Amino acid sequence: GLITGSVAQARNVVTVLNGAAANGDHDDAVISSLKAVYNLSKRTSVYGLFTNVNNESLANLAVSGAPMPTVANGKSSRGLAFGVAHAF
C-alpha cells in the first residue's frame, strides 16, 4: 500500500468584502489531504481520500471546488472519497 499526504495554504482568498477590496487579514485557508492506495492485483487497486479545508474567519473555501461558496465564513469543509481503479 501507499499513503501520501499534502498541506497547502491559500492566501488572500477573499478579494471583495462588502463591495470593497479586502485587506488580506483573516482570509487564508489551509488545505490538508491524506490519500491511501492498496493494490489488490497488478491492475486493480482501491483508494481512499480525505481532505480538510480550514478557513480563517473571513475565508469560505470548500472541498467541492464549486464557484459559489458552500460554507459560511470561518467554517471548515471536509470531503471523503473511496473508490476502485482498474487499468484495462
Image: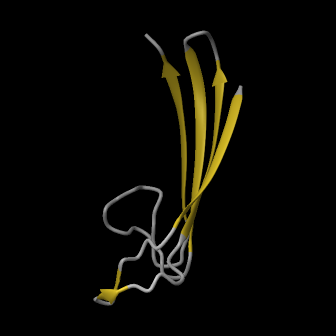
Q: Is residue 19 left or right of residue 65?
A: left
- Judge whether 68 appears above or below 73 on screen: above
> Which residue appears farthest toward the left when viewing the image?
19
Q: Reply above or below: 19 against 5.
A: below
Classify the position of the N terminus by image quarter: top right
Instruction: Name the residue: 49% across, 17% down.
Output: 86
Q: How is the image coloured?
A: secondary structure
| Placement of 82 over or under 55, stated as above or below | above
Point 53% across, 78% down: residue: 74
Could you tell me how many numbered marks the image carries?
A: 0
The location of residue 30, given as percent across then percent down, is 58, 64
Quadrant (top left/top right/bottom left/bottom right) for the C terminus: top left
Residue 8 image offset from top left, x and y in percent: 58, 57
Q: Position of residue 50 (x, y in %)?
A: 60, 48
- Which residue is more in the foreground, 6 or 64? 6
**Residue 85 placed where, x, y %?**
50, 23
Where is residue 4, by image quadrant? Answer: top right
Towards the viewer: 1 or 26: 26
* Residue depicted at 53% across the width and 72% down the height: 28
Q: Residue at x 60, y 37 (%)?
A: 48
Q: Is residue 65 left or right of residue 39?
A: left
Give the quadrant of residue 32.
bottom right
